[in-house]
Amino acid sequence: MTDREAFFGRIVENLDPRYRIADLDKAAGTFDLCDEERKVPVSLPLDLLAEYREQLNGSTLPDFPESPEEARDQARLMFIRIWIEELFEADVLRTVREIRLARAADGRLSLVRRRGPVQRPFPRAETDGAYWSAD
């Protein structure tokens, strides 16, 4: 197992236990993130993941530890894990079809989501004085 595979494995192992992992492929850096209602493929290509890991440093992560590599890797791991969970949880209309690590036009790497058609209807207006906003 390479260091990239080990880092990928730690991301998967530390995801919130509310989620189920299916079709895990550590060599390819892919898995399906599942809850009770849906399954979203997650793709973290290991070559890009290694580069992304190095991109996450003191200028990208607040309070990045100036300490041993293990502490810095833990901060990187937590950032990636939380971002994957946020992309998954914020999908209230069930439009996310894939979460992947990809290179932007400026060359930087980031976690992005690919969307599809809405799978859940917009919440009804009768909410006893409460309101819903896409923001």
Image (cartoon, helix red, strand yellow):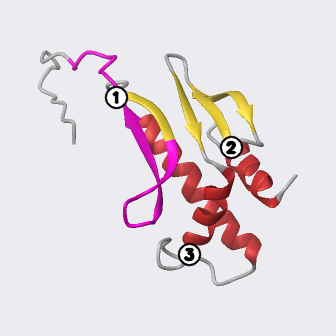
User: Taking the image as drawn, is residue 66 in sight?
Assistant: yes
Disc number for residue 29: 2
Residue, disc 1: 92
Residue 49 higher or lower than 58, as above or below: above
Front label number (1 vs 3)? 3
Residue, disc 3: 57
Q: Which amino acid does label 1 sit on?
A: Val
Front label number (3 vs 2)? 2
Name the one closer to the observer, 99 or 90. Answer: 99
Residue 88 higher or lower than 64, as above or below: above
Q: Quadrant of residue 54?
A: bottom right
Which residue extends farthest right?
1
Q: Which residue is drawn at 72% across and 32% down?
A: 24
> Is-magenta flag for residue 103?
yes
User: Taking the image as drawn, is residue 18 in sight?
Assistant: no
Secondary structure type for disc 2: loop
- From the viewer's perspective, tell me whether residue 40 is left or right of residue 70: left
> Is-magenta flag for residue 106?
yes
Name the one closer to the observer, 35 or 42. Answer: 42
Q: Residue at x 56, y 31 (%)?
A: 41
